[in-house]
Amino acid sequence: MNASTDSRDKGAPSWAGTPLVRVVLSQAIGAAVALGAAFAGTAATGIAVPLFAVLVAMGVVAAWIGTKLRLARWWIPVQMALPPAAALVSLVAIPAWLYLTAFVLLGLVYWNSARNRVPLYLTNRATWEAIAKLIPDGPGRRFLDIGHGIGGVLFFLSHRRPDAELTGIESAPLLFIISRLRARLKKAGNIDFRYGDFWKLDLSGYDVVYAFLSTAPMAALFEKAQREMKPGALFISNSFAVPGTAPTDTVMVNDRRKTKLYVWRIPHSS
Ligand SMILES: C[S@@+](CC[C@H](N)C(=O)[O-])C[C@H]1O[C@@H](n2cnc3c(N)ncnc32)[C@H](O)[C@@H]1O
């Protein structure tokens, strides 16, 4: 789940940028080293190095460079497999428009993965139930899902808490459009789906703010929540703690992945 943002990333040199940039960089170095060595070997011995050996060498060098750039360990097999896999795929006659369509669709869904390091995965039903129990009783409670994905949490709450005002904000275009279409089909009247960046949204009007993101934004997001949310309001994070800040409460969800909901109550200023 949080593999893309594990602790190894913290020590990465700042110039190395996001994991994606580091992968591209290590593959480029791997290609330069392996091709250079193959050309030099052929020039010196007159024996051509088999292409497959060059591709394997590219992957091995890239994986090694990746560890030096402090990429998470799971990138090692991925980086090793990448050059041979790319060569194999290029042998299969797949029409170019299919690549383009897949690329555009993935881009519209995983809009934030490379930049904000927040991929798409969805809150499960058991966790929806646990979240519903955390919303204070009484009509007109304002609940916000930051990064609403395809709206699952909000659609569930629209049935469970029809008396609540539900808002979602999402910056991946396709996910936003899907949520809007689902709202029309389900006739969910109490959900306001907004397209945009949650960093630009003022959190002061909400009684409960829910986040299921990644480890990467948590420290800055918690600072924003503390700055903007009103005293007594709840900030809930699914699975991702805030470094160095103990939650007010932790809800253990009885699901297969043993989900933890970290809950902070915004304190009253003294
Ligand atoms: C892990 S998914 C959670 C989806 C949904 N909240 C759920 O629990 O089922 C995180 C979502 O946050 C969105 N996201 C990431 N950064 C964002 C940003 N700065 N503004 C708005 N949405 C963002 C992603 O596109 C993704 O859909």
Image (cartoon, rainbow, N blue to C red):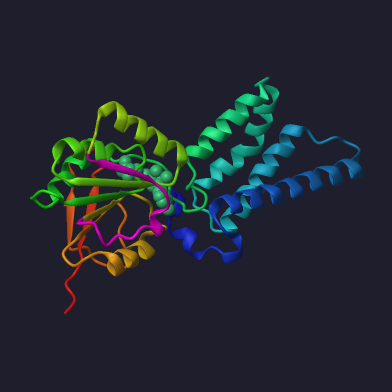
Where on the picture, by quarter, is residue 235?
bottom left
**Could one spot residue 2 in this view of the protein?**
no
Judge left or right: residue 199 versus residue 249: right
Give the residue drawn at x 25%, y 64%: 229
17 in relation to 114, above or below: below
246 in relation to 181, above or below: below
**Image position, residue 57 (x, y; %):** 69, 42
Segment colored magenta:
190-207
**Could one spot residue 64 in this view of the protein?**
yes
Q: Furthest residue to the bottom?
A: 270
**Image position, residue 254 (x, y; %):** 17, 41
Give the residue drawn at x 28%, y 68%: 226
**Image position, residue 167 (x, y; %):** 28, 47
Give the residue drawn at x 21%, y 42%: 127
**Image position, residue 213 (x, y; %):** 36, 50
Locate the C terminus and report the quarter of the image it occupies.
bottom left
In the depicted view, which residue is nearer to us: 161 or 46? 161
Q: Is residue 193 magenta?
A: yes
Q: Furthest residue to the left?
A: 138
Judge left or right: residue 133 versus residue 47: left
In the depicted view, which residue is nearer to us: 48 or 258? 258
Q: Is residue 208 magenta?
A: no
Give the residue drawn at x 55%, y 41%: 78
